[in-house]
Amino acid sequence: MDPAAQRVAVGRVRGLHGLRGAVRVEVLTDRPAERFAAGARVLAGERVLTVVEAAQDGPGLRVHFAEVADRTAAESLRDLDLEVEVDRERDLEPGAVFWHELRGVRVTDVDGRDLGTVRDVYRAGGAEVIAVAGGVVRPFEMPVVHAFIRAWRPREGSIVVDADALDLAPAAAADREPATG
């Protein structure tokens, strides 16, 4: 493994398709045409899989791998993440982060009030959304857009948002999750 590279999930096997080993993949990358192109390689645990073909299948892809000959072999991939090696300097724009790097980042308002930490990241429509919990406000979800974000420093462990624009209400004691790391 390249010391500068790290592994990131680009898909998750959600189901099987037919008897010849094709799988249904939930796409977790913004570059599915590149990541699942014929000849591309992905990692499923320690197994290297070579994409033979990929086609749109509802909200995800139907993918056939050279190393997976039948439904029985495909079953061993169910619920596994499909990963690729990436290099931050080569694969990311300046200031961008991988989704997994957002989990655990502290979110505050412009006055420094602790709003919680990022618990999850997902895509809805054309925007990434972060789910935040564990602060002085109720858990909330927020699209990652300029209208709400005042300072974007996830590599330093901080995101500052405009709480008024988000209309965040204080959490009752029972709604607060214990703060973690």
Image: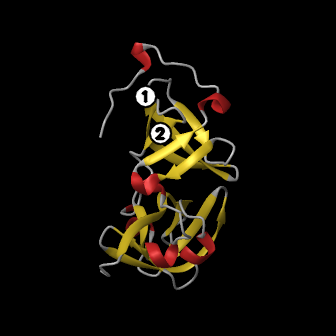
Please identify the quarter of the rendering in which residue 94 is found.
Answer: bottom right
State which tag comes first along the sequence, 1 or 2: 2
Circle 1: element type: loop
Q: Which residue is mark 1?
A: 135
- How many numbered marks appear? 2
Q: Which mark, by number, is residue 168?
A: none
Q: Is residue 26 left or right of residue 165?
A: left
| For residue 130, above or below residue 171 | below
Say which quadrant the C terminus sits in: top left
Identify which residue, 4 or 45, lies in the foreground: 4
Asked if the residues shown at circle 1 and circle 2 are in contact, with their CB atoms under 8 angstroms apart, the answer is yes
Foreground: 41 or 76?
41
Q: Residue at x 58, y 79 (%)?
A: 37
Residue in the image at 47% along x and 29% along y: 113
Query: Which amino acid lies under the numbered mark 1 shown in the image of this protein?
Result: Gly
Q: Which residue reaches farthest bottom?
A: 39
Q: In the rendering, which numbered label is found on residue 107?
A: 2
Q: Eyeballing the image, is 69 above or below 138?
A: below
**Tag 1: Cα neighbours inside 10 Å, few (<14), some, or many (≥20)?**
many
Tell whether 165 sits left or right of 40.
Answer: right
Camera-nearest residue between 147 and 29: 147
In the figure, residue 164 lies in which quadrant? top right
Rendered residue at 61%/59% (across/down): 60
Q: Quadrant of the N terminus?
A: bottom left
